[in-house]
Image: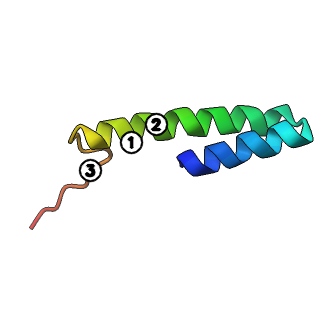
Amino acid sequence: MIVLGIILLVVGFLTGLSLLWTIGIILLVVGAILWILGAMGHAVAGRRHYW
């Protein structure tokens, strides 16, 4: 998600499309938050298994 955000930021910057720039920033921020939560050991959108 972080890589996709960076790619969209670069493409949006080169083409001048502000929509791609905005989506890239959002993906970058959300990806960074999920990465930090995962590194801290929190289950992000974990699944429960009912056996």
Mark 2: which amino acid? Ala
Q: Residue furthest left?
A: 51
> Contact (CB < 8 A) between labels 1 and 2?
yes
Q: Pointer 3: what residue? A: 46
Q: Kindly identify the residue that appears in the image at 53 percent across and 32 percent down.
A: 29
Q: Is residue 28 left or right of residue 13?
A: left
What's the CA distance linking mark 2 and mark 3?
18 Å
Above or below: residue 2 compared with residue 18 = below
Q: Kindly identify the residue that appears in the image at 35 percent across and 36 percent down.
A: 36
Instruction: Name the image colouring.
Output: rainbow
Residue 25 in percent (x, y) is at 64, 32
Residue count near mark 2 (Cα–Cα under 10 Å), binned few <14, some 14–19, many ≥20: some
Q: Closer to us: mark 1 or mark 3?
A: 1
Residue 4 in percent (x, y) is at 62, 50
Residue count near mark 3 (Cα–Cα under 10 Å), binned few <14, some 14–19, many ≥20: few
Total number of numbered labels?
A: 3
User: SS class of the residue under badge 3?
Assistant: loop
What's the CA distance linking mark 1 and mark 3?
14 Å
Q: Quadrant of residue 13?
A: top right
Say which of 32 and 22 sits in front.
Answer: 32
What's the CA distance linking mark 1 and mark 2?
5 Å
Q: Kindly identify the residue that appears in the image at 87 percent across and 37 percent down.
A: 17
Q: Pointer 1: what residue? A: 35
Q: Pointer 2: what residue? A: 32
Q: Is residue 17 left or right of residue 50?
A: right
Mark 3: which amino acid? Gly
Mark 1: which amino acid? Trp
Q: Quadrant of residue 8?
A: top right
Q: Quadrant of residue 5?
A: top right
